[in-house]
Amino acid sequence: MAFKKGLFKTSVSRKNLMAVTGLFIIFFLIIHLAGNLILILPDSFFPIEFWGNVANQHDMYNAYSHFLVHFWPITVVAWVLYAAIALHIFDAALITWDNWKAKGEKYQVVDNSSSSWISRNMGLLGVTIGAFIVMHMAQFWLQYKVLKVEHDLYNLVIETFKVWWMVVLYEIGIIAFGLHIIHGIESAHRSLGLYPEKAMNIIKIIALWFSLIMAVLYAIIPIILYFK
């Protein structure tokens, strides 16, 4: 393709870009999770003496959301995140295209018996996550930050997760995300070559447990709010 220049020029540079953008997105997801856990913390966790005027879950979450929208360094980081997501998706499409093209040109039967189901289906998982991101941003980011038609984000979140099929859709997206980053973390570190090969077994174990913990913590939020 004519546009494969700069960062997209070689397969190595494309994989490195995929690794860097992927790890940055995962870093954001950790911060995002910390903020969303406010939704399931008891009101007793927010004593007014410590949090100033914030005395409950509702006020704390709205204060947190207001801070994210109006603190300009966060806005800068947000635009970097959007760029990272766009690059990650575009880079993934290029890599997938090259893989399909290579298989077609070589007429080879590839033996995938030694690869995991996750690694063979990263594209499918990526598409599922992409659809989930669009739904999530349309539901919250668009209404609260862009259109400004909703000023109480806490109530919007609570109302959303009182709908059972929305909870199901979110659980599907979270499962796809968890599976995607199990392979993604290991693959990113392997592409960047930060550690000797012997250390990759440890990275693989860390990736598995990290992904499991992240997915479980994300998954319990809609469920708890539905039954609240």
Image (cartoon, grey):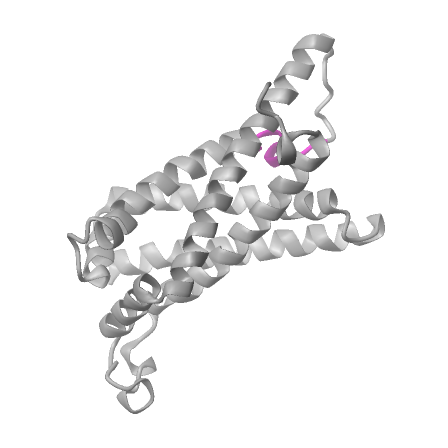
The residue sitting at 19% across, 61% down in the picture is: 155
The residue sitting at 45% across, 57% down in the picture is: 77
Q: Is 208 located above or below residue 191 in the figure? A: below
Q: Is residue 207 visible?
A: yes
The percent position of residue 70, horizontal first and vertical second, equals 30, 65
Residue 44: quadrant of the picture: bottom left
Q: Is residue 219 magenta?
A: no
Q: Left of 202 or right of it: where is 178?
A: left
> Residue extending furthest left?
149
Q: Is 26 located above or below residue 73 in the figure? A: above
The percent position of residue 127, horizontal first and vertical second, equals 46, 32
The residue sitting at 72% across, 42% down in the picture is: 191
Towards the viewer: 172 or 17 = 17
Question: What count of labels does the image hold?
Answer: 0
The residue sitting at 77% across, 47% down in the picture is: 193
Towards the viewer: 152 or 164 = 152
The percent position of residue 2, horizontal first and vertical second, equals 59, 19
Towards the viewer: 161 or 100 = 100
The percent position of residue 129, horizontal first and vertical second, equals 44, 39
Q: Is residue 183 visible?
A: no
Query: Magenta part of the protein: which range?
Result: 115-122
* Rendered-image quadrant of the C terminus: bottom left
Q: Left of 32 or right of it: where is 160?
A: left
Q: Is 71 located above or below residue 5 in the figure? A: below
* Rendered-image quadrant of the N terminus: top right
Decide whether the magenta segment is chiefly helix, strand or loop.
Answer: helix
Q: Is 12 located above or below residue 192 in the figure? A: above
